Image (tube, grey):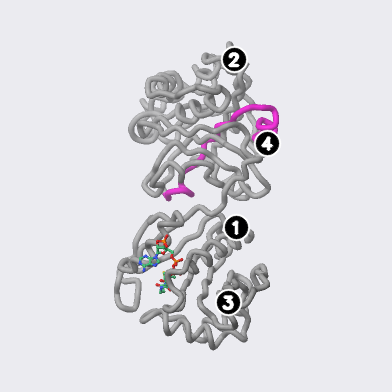
Amino acid sequence: MAPQVQNKPAPGEIELRTPDIEDLEALVGLENKSFTTDKLSRRSFRHWLTNAKCNFLVAERDGQLLGYGLVLLQQGTRLARLYSLAVDPAARGLGLGERMLLQLEELAVESKRLFMRLEVEEGNRRAIDLYEKLGYKQFGEIPDYYENHSRALRMQKCIRRINAAQISHPCLWYQQTTDFTCGPAALLMSIASQSPGFKPSQEQELDIWRQATTIFMTTGHGGCHPIGLALAAQDMGFEAEVVVNNEAPLFLDGVRSQDKKKIVSLVDRQFRDKAQSRQIPVKIEQLELQHIRSWLAGGYTVMVLISTYRFEGRKAPHWVMVTGMDELCMYVHDSDIGEHMQDALDCQHVPIALADFSKMASYGANKMRTAVAIRRR
Ligand SMILES: CC(C)(COP(=O)(O)OP(=O)(O)OC[C@H]1O[C@@H](n2cnc3c(N)ncnc32)[C@H](O)[C@@H]1OP(=O)(O)O)[C@@H](O)C(=O)NCCC(=O)NCCS
């Protein structure tokens, strides 16, 4: 069962606690008062009351159950799912729904989950207001989801927050101004993290892109080569190091025509030659978490190339800046407010589970992994 929540309530005080099988009847009663369709059955409650893969909370006052919340812990994922939340009609509007949900989020973080997801009926204004107030954002919808055929909104919140002590540098966030300038945006954030008062601009963003671009990458404009970013950083007064697990030209898989492949290869050669003549260390080895840890410990700021597949289901190479690490996660600033990220806060200190790092920081058929670290000279 989930971690126990213990409070010693004073008379009249509302206590949050983990329910047990003795609460079954009261839970069924509460369910009937709270929902007209899609009710949890007695059998489901019995199941979840005795199941370890959930966090279950009830709110009680003077022996009377006033509300419950149930979160399922999906195995093999970083997700928790708010399966149900209900407050007795007589106790609504007292802040109980909010209190239970916040407590359930904390329990989910203790259960090593990074994101809380939920479905809510599109007309359920009270519930939607509550979720929005607590920072949930809609990321999808499911037509004909409920028994009454209404649509469900899918909402999500990042519940794991970086501890201030784990932040490696002051971390300004900058929003990239084009689709193809995640690399320059990551570099500008990295420079800002080492240069108090530095303000990134679009001019600098485009300048860096012109210096570091691979010219072509998948369709459209090229993104940035790790060595290109390192060279740009050196020009701006930083020492830079690159780790890449491949000696073959980078991003070659992404382009189809032979002409484009030739150009991408030539640009890769030029970057490697320049790195050599300007004494920028380019280590050809497998990028591991240990590289990032020791760079952070040495006062470097680190940019990692990730595949956005795990964020958005679309495979694209994407540069992010590492803002810190703890025992479970690496945190990154992502300069792209994508379709599912709706505001700047969603893109700051985004957690990536360390256990997922090798899949996340690996791009394309040849599993390219690369990172650039910079430190003020
Ligand atoms: C949704 C529900 C759990 C909210 O519980 P609650 O204890 O009444 O909510 P709270 O008192 O914590 O209110 C928190 C926020 O919810 C929203 N809210 C609460 N009552 C509301 C109302 N009458 N109208 C609109 N919004 C309301 C507000 O945003 C409120 O914040 P505020 O007080 O700062 O304005 C409760 O209404 C309920 O049980 N509904 C039936 C079951 C249900 O629909 N569950 C959700 C399934 S997805």
Residue receiving disc 1? 109
Q: Are marks 3 and 1 in contact (CB under 8 Å)?
A: no
Q: How many marks?
A: 4
Could you say where residue 228 lies in the image, as x and y percent from the top left?
50, 22
Above-or-below relation of 371 to 73? above
Residue type at the position of mark 2? Gln
- Is the CB atom of the residue marked by disc 3 within 8 angstroms of ligand 1's nearest atom? no
Which quarter of the image is occupied by the C terminus?
Answer: top right
Disc number lying in front (2 or 1): 1
Disc number lying in front (3 or 1): 3
Q: Quadrant of residue 62?
A: bottom right
The residue segment tinted magenta is 290-313
SS at mark 4? helix
Could you say where residue 345 lies in the image, as x and y percent from the top left?
46, 43
* Label 3 vs 2, first from the N-terminus: 3
Residue type at the position of mark 1? Val
Which quarter of the image is occupied by the N terminus?
Answer: bottom right
Whether 295 is among the magenta residues is yes
